Image (tube, grey):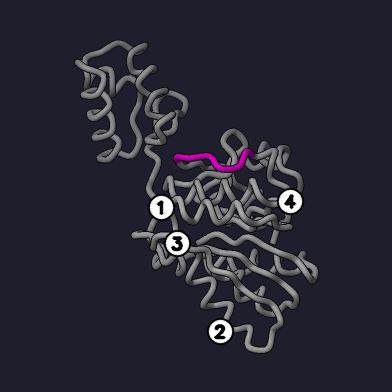
Amino acid sequence: MWLEARHQRIQSLLERLNRVTTDQVVVELGVSRETVRRDFLDLEAQGVLRRVHGGAVRIQPEPPIGKRIATRVKYKQSIAHAVAQRLDRALTLFLDAGSTTTLLARELARLSDLTIITNSLDAAYKFREEAEESNSRIIVLGGELSPRLPATSGSVTVAEISRYSVDYALLSPVAIDAARGATSFEHDEAAIAQAMVRNARQTFILADYSKIGQRSRITYCAANKVDMLFTNTRAAEQEGYGELKAKVGEVVLA
């Protein structure tokens, strides 16, 4: 069986079962364990699956933002509040697009003398609604309108980010673990976050407890490059939390 055909069959199995063992794939494809091992390595590099002991699990695409904004709200809100408490006046910030950073925009609106640079239309609207008398300002990055969420994206957005040098990048990944760091499912979103990391003095990662010890397809910030990780007290119960805590600069439990 050709390599591409094997990869398609493995992906089909994962879409149906979410998790497969090496032995299952050996029987299904009629190939050796060594061939399956190589295929798992290839597909993990492509962000299709994550290898686990004895097999592999499917990497799930991120749900639409309309659904994410309504899940684990109290945990995301506590993170947003904790971040705002750590910020001083007269700062310039990057803010990427996500449900947690949208909640953070409302908290930032209560502060003064901030310049916020974001690709998130939701964050910009929330900030303006709450910041009627604030002397802070928000700059929306140009680019194409993303088909997946209310935000700009693409090469123009990435190029605009490179024009700025900011104090902190405040980013909300799909997942974060010790081995892969902060990861995203979509290439465009990862490229934007990576550019923000590159042009910020420090990187703050905002990840509710469910994202701890997990990974998605594309790494945009290694764990040892995270200056501060904001998560929930429940994160300490997640597999991989200890290893992640040892790698990042500081963990704030909200």
Please state which of the two labelled residues, at mark 4 or mark 2, is closer to the viewer.
4
Image height of 218 relative to 51, above or below: below
- Local secondary structure at mark 2: helix
Task: Tell me if label 2 and label 1 are in contact, CB under 8 Å.
Answer: no
Check disc 1 and report the residue beneath it.
Answer: 62
Direction from residue 183 to residue 233 in the image, left or right: right
The tag on residue 1 is: none
Check if residue 148 falls in the magenta segment: no
For this rendering, which residue is in front, 3 or 131? 131
Check disc 2 and report the residue beneath it.
Answer: 129
Check disc 4 and report the residue beneath it.
Answer: 201
- Dominant secondary structure (helix, strand or loop) of the stretch shown in magenta: strand
Residue 206's x, y, as percent?
A: 62, 56
- Local secondary structure at mark 3: strand
- Local secondary structure at mark 4: strand
Task: Tell me if label 4 and label 3 are in contact, CB under 8 Å.
Answer: no
For this rendering, which residue is in front, 50 or 180? 180
Check disc 3 and report the residue beneath it.
Answer: 152
Direction from residue 51 to residue 76 in the image, left or right: right
Please state which of the two labelled residues, at mark 1 or mark 3, is closer to the viewer.
3
Residues in magenta, as a range: 217-222
Q: How many marks?
A: 4
Mark 3: few, some, or many residues within 10 Å (few <14, many ≥20)? Answer: many
Q: CA distance from mark 2 to mark 3?
A: 20 Å
